[in-house]
Amino acid sequence: WNIDFLLDLGRDKLIDVLQMDIAGYGFTNWRKIMPDLISSGIFASPHTWGDPLKVIYTAHLSAGLGNIPIIEGIPSITYDADLMLYKLQDGKLYIPENSPGFGMRIKESLLED
């Protein structure tokens, strides 16, 4: 990704949202570029297609950094994690409070053997 070029496009009002994949581009890179996106008038909406865990990761990124007005919500299933602490209400995803890590539990059935 040529981030400087994308920031220039944003400053020129030619783009208004960046959507690199949360897993492919990564948490650290999103954290590094968010201040530049904000100062350039560009929103972020990390791509989450194909994995409900990416929706959770992006929700946490949004809660921590802001500037993410919408998160892709893809109906899908994960068999590895219990996401029951997350609540979707009135179009908003509520992140569990006072839970370690991302607030997910590994499903007990995976821990039995």
Image (spheres, rainbow, N blue to C red):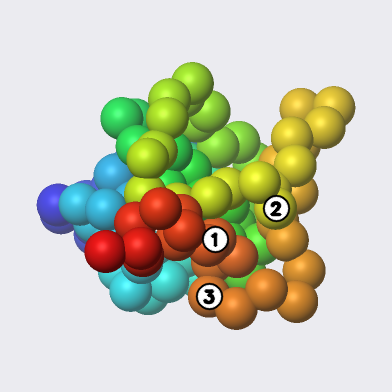
Read off the residue under disc 1.
104
Residue at (39% x, 38% y) in the render? 78
Whether 77 is drawn above or below 97: the answer is above
In-image side of 105 versus 12 (left or right): right
Is the Cβ of the residue at disc 2 closer than 8 Å to that at disc 1?
yes
Q: Considering only order in the chain, which callout, 1 or 2, is on the residue closer to the N terminus?
A: 2
Query: Does residue 44 appear in the picture of this structure?
Result: no
Residue reaching furthest top? 75
In-image side of 25 versus 58 (left or right): left
Residue 87's image quarter? top right
Who is closer to the viewer here, 18 or 98? 98
Q: CA distance from mark 2 to mark 1?
A: 7 Å
Give how far across and how far down residue 92 sits, in percent. Answer: 76, 36
Whether 14 is drawn above or below 112: the answer is above
Give how far across and how far down residue 16 sits, in percent. Answer: 48, 36
Read off the residue under disc 2.
85
Is the Cβ of the residue at disc 1 closer than 8 Å to that at disc 3?
yes
Read off the residue under disc 3.
101
| Label 2 residue SS | loop
Look at label 1 and name its amino acid: Met
Who is closer to the viewer here, 102 or 46? 102
Give how far across and how far down residue 31 sits, in percent. Answer: 42, 71
Q: CA distance from mark 1 to mark 3?
A: 7 Å
Look at label 2 and name its amino acid: Leu
Closer to viewer: mark 1 or mark 3: 1
Query: Does residue 82 appear in the picture of this structure?
Result: yes
Look at label 3 and name its amino acid: Gly
Q: Quadrant of the C terminus?
A: bottom left
Q: Considering only order in the chain, which callout, 3 or 2, is on the residue closer to the N terminus?
A: 2
Q: Sort mark 2 into few (<14), some (14-19) or many (20+) by Cα contacts within 10 Å.
A: few
